Amino acid sequence: MKRIVCLLVCLVMLCSFAFAEEAVITEVSPEVLIDEYEGGAIPYEMRICKLAPNKKSMTYIEYPYFSDYSNNRNTSMRISILNEMVFDRVIYLAAQVYLNYGYEKPIDISYKCNITLNNGKLVSLVFWGDLNSHEQYEPVRSNERHDRHISAITVNLSTMREERFVDMYNVNDERFEQTVYNAAHLPINPEMVYVLDSMTFDEQMSFLHDDFESPMSMIMSGYLLPEGVVIILSESHAGGDYFLAQVEHEHMMPFWRLDIDLLIE
């Protein structure tokens, strides 16, 4: 049902864009390019999807396009499906914003993308970026609205299905919450880290731990790294739009629900 809704949203999005001045365009970004297999990694190049729903708005979403040099029919089919899943997410990200704010609103969206795990068994990536609206919103005092958004997707290449955070980890284990609270730290990659308004990382984690009946219900999603996982948590009232907590595999393995070999390169 979720996939059907997503596809319907994407169809509406594409139909709306068909009347825009600038249609869907993809272009190669020179920033990242893998030309050959390294440690099982699937070769890819970064592309940019440009969408123009109206004359006053523009959307830029960076995303990977994976290539296959194996000459294996089964591998080629899986990589083709992987590319479809990634691009579905790209369109869905844009569609969500415009469905929420309206197609005629003057909105600019800019998403970057990082492939955080690419070991030939799992592909995990994260989109993050800014939404800027140039229209008056009541009771907002200024005419600029700025939001930070993030979205992650992990694909299991053996089943060709998206693995949600709750598919990968048993969050209902009674030890899970305390383990995350004790072991979590600010992610090493500073580019994706959202700067909290007035709270340090430790203060934010303590706020969740002490003031919410079920802090793990704040989990939005997560993305895998070679050394661990980054959990995306929704904002607290004193924080930003989201914040990130990294936990190494050694602490999270008791809760891992998939085949352990998927994490081994």
Image (cartoon, rainbow, N blue to C red):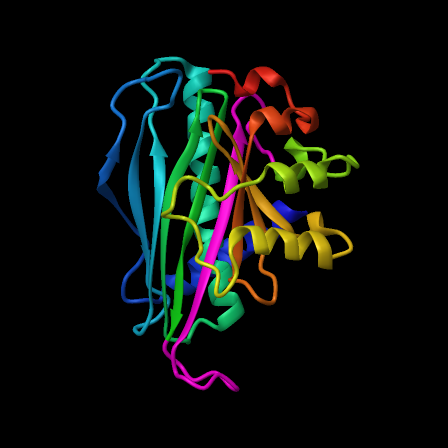
Between 261 and 30, which is closer to the camera in this rendering?
261
Residue 157 among magenta residues: yes
The image quarter containing residue 63 is top left
* Residue 233 located left or right of residue 135: right
Residue 208 among magenta residues: no
Residue 259: percent from left, percent from top: 63, 18
Between 212 and 256, which is closer to the camera in this rendering?
212
Placement of 229 over or under 53, stated as above or below: above
Residue 98: percent from left, percent from top: 47, 66
Rendered residue at 68%/26% (across/down): 257
How many numbered marks, from 0 up?
A: 0
Which residue is the extreme one toward the left? 30
Between 47 and 264, which is closer to the camera in this rendering?
264
* Residue 209 located left or right of residue 102: right
Residue 153: percent from left, percent from top: 51, 40
The image quarter containing residue 75 is top left
Placement of 134 over or under 159, stated as above or below: below
Between 58 and 153, which is closer to the camera in this rendering?
153
Residue 51: percent from left, percent from top: 34, 59
Placement of 131 over or under 174, stated as above or below: below
The stretch in magenta equals 134-163
* Residue 122 located left or right of residue 255: left
Rendered residue at 47%/45% (across/down): 88
Rendered residue at 45%/23% (across/down): 77
